[in-house]
């Protein structure tokens, strides 16, 4: 009798235990939306950042924007202002 009771309790508890691992509410973002947000953040110069420069400084954001523009052929990559300096005034991106 004890064995039958144990089996019944185990069988009845299985559906309740399975619900504990089910994802009840999805995150709401699709993979495409996340990729679009990541690409937008890259275009704005917010990523990538070095681990010792968080939150990114204005100079780091300007540098990331310039690199993104060069890599993706966006607009006038040479005319990107860096850290508030006018083009050709020896901003962060110039050597």
Image (spheres, rainbow, N blue to C red):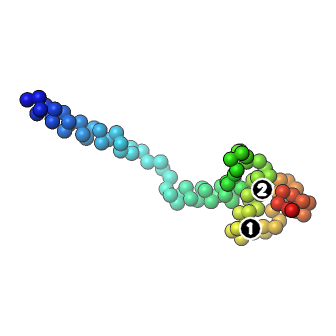
Residue shown at 12% from the left, 32% from the top: 3
Vertical comparison of 11 with 87: above or below = above
Residue shown at 39% from the left, 45% from the top: 23
Residue shown at 70% from the left, 68% from the top: 71
Secondary-structure class at tag 2: helix
**Which quadrant of the view contains residue 81?**
bottom right
Q: Which residue is mark 2?
A: 62
Horizontal placement of 7 versus 60: left or right?
Answer: left
- Residue 74 seen from this side: no
Asked if labels 2 and 1 touch by Cβ distance under 8 angstroms, the answer is: no
**Which quadrant of the view contains residue 1?**
top left
Task: Tell me residue 28's x, y (percent).
Answer: 48, 50
- Residue 38 seen from this side: yes
* Mark 1 crowd level (few <14, some 14–19, many ≥20, 10 Å Cα): some
**Which quadrant of the view contains residue 11?**
top left
Task: Tell me residue 53's x, y (percent).
Answer: 73, 46
Task: Tell me residue 15's x, y (percent).
Answer: 25, 41
| Marked residue nearer the N-terminal end (1 or 2) | 2
Task: Tell me residue 10's x, y (percent).
Answer: 20, 36
Q: Residue furthest left?
A: 1
Horizontal placement of 22 versus 45: left or right?
Answer: left
Residue shown at 24% from the left, 40% from the top: 14
Q: Quadrant of the C terminus?
A: bottom right
Secondary-structure class at tag 1: helix
Vertical comparison of 69 with 34: above or below = below
Horizontal placement of 11 versus 31: left or right?
Answer: left
Mark-to-mark CA distance, 1 and 2:
12 Å
Q: Which residue is mark 1?
A: 70
* Mark 2 crowd level (few <14, some 14–19, many ≥20, 10 Å Cα): many
Horizontal placement of 11 versus 30: left or right?
Answer: left
Number of marks: 2
């Amino acid at each position: 009798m004890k064995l039958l009771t144990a089996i019944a309790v185990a069988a009845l508890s299985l559906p309740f235990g399975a619900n504990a691992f089910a994802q009840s509410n999805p995150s709401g973002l699709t993979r495409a939306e996340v990729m679009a947000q990541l690409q937008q953040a890259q275009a704005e110069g917010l990523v990538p950042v070095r681990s010792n420069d968080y939150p990114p400084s204005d100079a780091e954001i300007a540098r990331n924007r310039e690199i993104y523009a060069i890599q993706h052929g966006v607009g006038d990559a040479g005319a990107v202002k860096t850290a508030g300096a006018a083009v050709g005034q020896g901003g962060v991106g110039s050597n």
